[in-house]
Image (cartoon, rainbow, N blue to C red):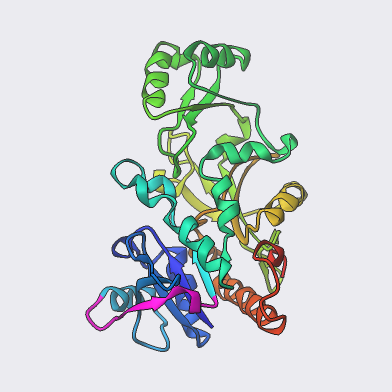
Amino acid sequence: MRIGFFVNDIKTEEPGYTTTRLAMAAINRGHEAWLMDAQSFAYDPDEKIRARARSAPKAQYKDSDKYVADLKGKNARVERITVDDLDVLMLRNDPSTDSGLRSWAQTVGINFGRIAMRHGVIVVNDPNGLAKAMDKMYFQLFPDEVRPTTLITMDRDEIKAFVKDQGGKAVLKPLQGSGGQGVFLVDEGSGSNLNQMIESLTRDGYVIAQEYLTAASEGDTRMFVMNGQPLRHKGKVAAFRRLRSGPDMRSNIHAGGKLRAAELTDTHFQIAEIVRPKLVEDGMFLVGLDIVGDKLMEINVFSPGGLGSVHKLINVNFAHTVIESLERKVHYMEYYDRSFSNAGMATL
């Protein structure tokens, strides 16, 4: 199997990233793994998609530090590959990190992935599904029973009224963004700063005002969903808990959150089942669900991370499970002469 991984920028890839672990798992299972980034693609006159891509030189890797060093080093294979000849193209970029001067890069994977898909490449997550999820408005398309009460607006008075209706306590965050960036907790002690919070957020666009979930004080649970089902291997589920660090309300690891083993309940699995039909419909192969209490806080469909953290916590390498699923998809595509639609393979 020849598999390509599209990332924001190869130079910023790190050993602990989930993409790194997936690429290593592919190599260790005997496949070719190519990495390409936002400036790599070309649509050539012969109507083929090509990309300047990098591949690590060895056939086996036990250490992700060594893999990344080889991938970025002088001995890496650097070729202009034909993307249409890949079996799988995995879109693993985070559009929110390419705002501002690199806003052109936010939809590169989606746009070139659509063309590659037309030529029979399995592209995950499905580019057409990802196009719907370019900001957090996508979250509002899921059943309301799993979502906190939410207002999305740029109007200061509407935000203030929402906060008042919520008893003076609510969460404010940008419609676009990830990793806990620009997230504010409004409570009785921050009322005098509410105007400044709103002004700061509206400079970059729409604001999400959201019900504060009291269970958030206990952190959140990241559960991985693959092919519409909780990602499992040998009876274990790929999930972990993130706890707050000190007074910071955010439990994101980038914001200093601490990891613990997840204690999954029927509620977690019920939430996954409620969102399953929409994820499958949109061709979302690998997704991260962030759950607080009995509600979803976020659905990460672009580059859900943390498989390495799960591996460390419960000693299960789910990266191999993900690659096994892609192998099955390639087998079906070859057997049926690529007659399956990309989104139609979501559960294979």
What is the residue that sits farthest to the front in this orientation? 45
Q: Is residue 1 visible?
A: yes
Residue 36 on image: x %, y %: 38, 68
**Left or right, residue 142 beside residue 288:** right
Quadrant location of the C terminus? bottom right
Residue 312: tell me if it is visible.
no
Q: Position of residue 261 (x, y in %)?
A: 58, 57
Is residue 247 highlighted in magenta? no
Residue 284, quarter of picture: bottom right
The residue shown at (72%, 34%) is: 144
Question: Which quadrant is the N terminus positioned in?
Answer: bottom right
Using the image, determine if residue 286 lies above or below residue 317: above
Q: Is residue 9 or residue 108 the one in the foreground?
A: 108
Furthest residue in direction left, as rendered: 74
Which residue is at 67% across, 35% downward? Answer: 147
The front one of 5 and 47 is 47
Q: Is residue 293 above or below residue 21?
A: above
Residue range highlighted in magenta: 73-87
Is residue 82 covered in magenta?
A: yes
Residue 61 appears in which quarter of the rendering?
A: bottom left
Q: How many marks?
A: 0
Residue 249 at x, y percent in the picture: 48, 34
What's the residue at 70%, 79% (across, down)?
A: 332
